[in-house]
Amino acid sequence: MANNPAWQTFLAATVPSFGFHWKTGQSELFITSIGTGNGLKKEDPDKLVNEKAVTWATKIPDLFMTDALEMNDIIMHVAGKNIGPDYKVDSQFYDLSQISKENQPLFSYQRYNVKLQSDFLQDLGFNYSDEEIKSLKEMDHYENMDKLLEIGKKYGESIMGSFKL
């Protein structure tokens, strides 16, 4: 869950044993979460069926990281009030803004994260091939650092008008 520490930050700020004693409530606590970017990985089902178990095992860490990232987003939507741009967490949880809350939200928040996907990057003015995007998603390819920095800058410029304080 620390891949996106927004929920842990909320807990640290409000759980009495941490000593901060911040008040909760939509107008009392505001959290901005800024991601490092993520992308949708599509696997060829025919190829997956024929892979050995050891190959599947190499995919497990990435599956856990993606699941933790998405679950944290879902928790933030359920417990808080998203006042940032609406976005699709995944194909199961498309429109979380419609969740009915019996109690008031515990906080307000915004989440910003670059989607390392062709259409998202094209909207920012980048035309990368599928292979280049695949490489960008790895995040540990040092040769992509300048590209990722440029993508981050462009995304930051595109969202500056949406920050609400």
Image (cartoon, rainbow, N blue to C red):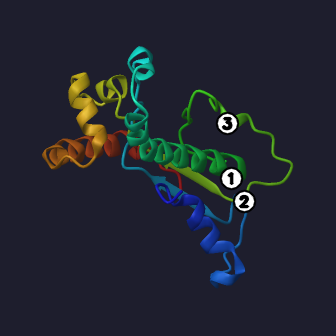
Q: Residue furthest left?
A: 143
> Which residue in the protein does label 1 denote?
80
The span from disc 3 to disc 1 (Cα, nearest Å) is 11 Å
- Find numbered disc 2 in the image and state the secondary structure of the residue it sits on: loop
- Which residue is found at the position 45% from the left and 20% from the top? 49
Above or below — where is 8 with respect to 71?
Answer: below
> Tag 1: Cα neighbours inside 10 Å, few (<14), some, or many (≥20)?
many
Question: Residue furthest toward the top?
Answer: 46
The reply to whether the C-beta atoms of the residues labelled 2 and 3 are less than 8 Å apart is no
Residue occupying the far right of the picture? 102
Query: Residue under circle 3?
Result: 96
Q: For the point 31% across and 39% down, which residue is it?
A: 137
Which badge, 3 or 1, comes first in the chain's sequence? 1
Element assignment for label 3: helix
Q: Is residue 125 left or right of residue 97?
A: left
**Res. 91 mark:** none
Provide residue 5's location: percent of width, then percent of height.
51, 60
Image height check: is 134 above or below 138? above
Q: Are marks 1 and 2 in contact (CB under 8 Å)?
A: yes
Counting from the top left corner in percent of width and height, residue 121 is at: 31, 29
Tag 3: amino acid: Leu
Q: Secondary structure at mark 1?
A: loop
Q: Position of residue 57 (x, y in %)?
A: 43, 41
Q: Amino acid at mark 1?
A: Gly
Q: Quadrant of the N terminus?
A: bottom right
Marks 1 and 2 sit apart, C-alpha to C-alpha, by: 5 Å
Of 121 and 40, the residue lying toward us? 40
Residue shown at 50%/47% (left/top)? 64
| Number of marks in picture | 3
Badge 3 vs badge 1, beta-carbon distance below 8 Å: no
Q: Which mark is residue 106?
A: 2
- Residue type indicated by callout 2: Leu
